Image (cartoon, rainbow, N blue to C red):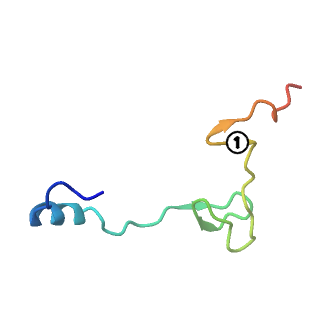
Amino acid sequence: MLPCQRKTRSQTRRGRANKGLRAPGFTRCPNCGSVRRHHTACPDCLYVPPRGPRQNGFILEHLVSED
């Protein structure tokens, strides 16, 4: 689909103003304490945080034990 009207120069430049680079998020590894990026394995000890039985942000009830 094509846009109905052409974007002006100011609208284009205003949109590009928010596309700057941001500093990546860092956190401490719970296993060895070294600094690692969010949602990645630790580069030193290769620890990957365990993920629970989730799908699309919701806990699957049939996989969670009721004990």
- Residue 24 x %, y %: 47, 66
Q: Nearer the viewer, residue 55 or 30?
A: 55
- For the C terminus, the quadrant is top right
Disc count in the image? 1
In the rendered view, does 67 fall on the left or right side of 28?
right
- Residue 16 x %, y %: 23, 66
Looking at numbered disc 1 in the image, what kind of residue is underneath it?
Arg
- Residue 64 x %, y %: 81, 33
Q: Residue at x 85, y 25 (%)?
A: 66
Q: Residue at x 60, y 67 (%)?
A: 35
In the rendered view, does 16 fall on the left or right side of 52?
left
Question: Which image quadrant is residue 14 in?
Answer: bottom left
Q: Nearer the viewer, residue 44 or 6?
A: 6
- For the N terminus, the quadrant is bottom left
Q: Residue at x 76, y 30 (%)?
A: 61
- Residue 33 x %, y %: 67, 63
Q: Dot 1: what SS?
A: strand
Q: Nearer the viewer, residue 51 or 43?
A: 51
Pointer 1 residue: 54
In the rendered view, does 13 fall on the left or right side of 47?
left
Against 57, residue 51 (above or below) is below
The residue most toward the front is 1
Q: Residue at x 81, y 31 (%)?
A: 62
